[in-house]
Image (tube, helix red, strand yellow):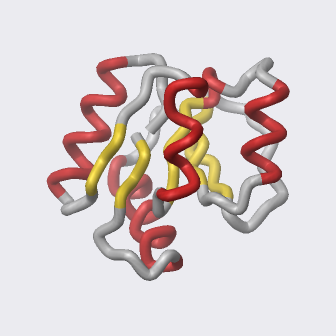
Amino acid sequence: MIAPDAGLRQSLAFALEVEGFQVLSYESWCAGHASAASSACTIIDSHEVHGNLDAQHKLLDSPSRFIMLADGMTPIPSKNTARILIKPFDGAELLRMVRDFAHLSHATPAPVAT
């Protein structure tokens, strides 16, 4: 997960680890984007890419799967490897998305960059 909010990172890491996923957490796009290529999926807080054109282009050009945590109206990425989850969200829905991506990568449980 790439998110500036330490509480969010800790909560999601705990929930995913309880379900058997290996979790990597990063505070910023700069610190965490390199791990996305080797992850089943990356969970990204939209605050980390809002206004960051480099991050937006890298996400959309990358074959990596990601789940964007958004605060409302966020454009839906037009790629099959991206999902949007609007805050506040249901933890079960996030787990379903992560499991779907892990299944697609043939690695269950798989590392999730968080």
| Residue at 79% across, 18% down | 51
Q: Quadrant location of the C terminus? A: top left
Q: Residue at x 61, y 33 (%)?
A: 70
Is residue 86 visible in the rendered image? The answer is no
User: From the viewer's perspective, is 81 left or right of 23?
Assistant: right
Rendering quarter of residue 52: top right
Give residue 22's position: percent from left, percent from top. Answer: 27, 54
| Position above or below: 71 against 15 | above
Q: Out of 75 and 17, give the one closest to the viewer.
A: 17
Residue lying farthest to the left in this orientation: 18
- Compared across the picture, whether 109 is left or right of 26 comes to left
In the drawing, does residue 49 fall left or right of residue 29? right
Can you give x and y, in whole percent of width and height, for residue 5 in the image?
41, 18
Q: Which quarter of the rendered picture does the N terminus lie within?
A: top left
Residue 45 falls in which quadrant of the image?
top right
- Please report the residue visible at 73 percent of the width from the left and 67 percent of the height from the top: 80
Against 9, residue 40 (above or below) is below
Residue 64, image x, y percentages: 63, 58
For the residue pair 56 and 34, the one nearer the viewer reads as 34
Can residue 10 be seen from the camera position used here? yes
Residue 72 point in image, percent of width and height:
66, 31
Total number of numbered discs in the rendering: 0
Residue ID at (53%, 22%): 28
Vertical comparison of 98 with 112: above or below: below
